[in-house]
Image (cartoon, rainbow, N blue to C red):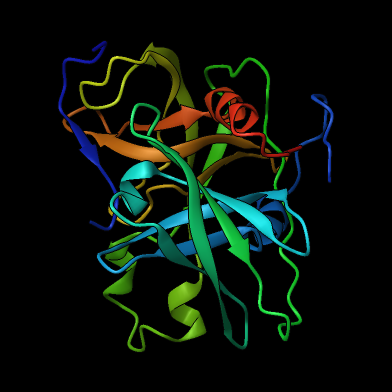
Amino acid sequence: MIYTMRILLVSAFALVLPIGASAQNLQTISAEAELSTARVITKTGRGSGFAVGKGQNGTFYVVTNNHVIEGHRDAIVAFGLKDRVVGYAAKVINASAEMDLAILHVFPKGSENHSVPLVPLATREINKGEEVFALGFPGSTDFWVGDKTSPDAFETTLTRGVVSKVSTGSWGGQSMQIELVLHTATINKGNSGGPLFNYCGQVMGVNTAGLIQANDNYVSSSSNTLAGFLRGSNIPFS
């Protein structure tokens, strides 16, 4: 394994943008990105995820970490709106412990008037110093929410930073070497499976872990790693 420091997993237990797409105001782009970011709930824990592909008959696909759904075949994918929480049943259709990635097939309720936008991936070279922000549901913010079923509990938390380094490594002793993005956008328990965005609204990585005693650096499976996983699973994405 390329890293000698300990890794702490942080689980709770068709728009195509050109490479040269201009950066947008963070407040605007994060509001749009939040519509695609979901809380992933299983019988034993919670994590984060985001919508990437469209299925048949109104279904869609959500990406999260394998360790968020490990041991489960079903999950709830929930989106927080201003006036309500919309939750959908989802089934795990593919998962990789080596990549720590999983794909959920989400089945919207026919009665819900709710459309989930799909986020594009940045399938290109990722550069040190690029500005990024993370969206997700860190457990530390849940402490301040009174009603854990309210829309407030399903509003994402945003942190921002920069890409510190792009490297090749593996998760927790796994043999597969994948592209990893180290960054400074703070994540913690509950952020697992959530998106790391650039300021063009493209996903740069899937937030997965914090590096202990590593100057507040955090690690994501890169968008290039995710794109390969989606292609291998025959899941459409932008």
Q: Where is residue 193? Give x, y as percent.
A: 43, 47
Instruction: Please state which of residues 169 and 70 is positioned toward the viewer in this rendering.
Output: 70
Location of residue 81 by image quarter: bottom right
- In the image, what residue occupies the spot 68% across and 24% down? 123
Quadrant of the image containing the C terminus: top right
Give above or below for 30 relative to 44: above
- In the foreground, 229 or 211: 229
Query: Residue 166: horizontal and vertical position, in percent?
Result: 46, 16
| Residue at image location 54% in from the left, 22% down from the top | 129
Q: Which residue sits at x=43%, y=64%?
A: 75
Left or right of residue 117: residue 231? left
**Left or right, 166 with reference to 26:** left
Image label count: 0
> Residue at position x 26%, y 10% from top?
2
Q: Is residue 67 left or right of residue 228?
A: left
Q: Position of residue 130 (x, y in %)?
A: 58, 26
Q: Name the quarter where the N terminus is drawn.
A: top left
The answer to whether residue 205 is above or below residue 189 is above
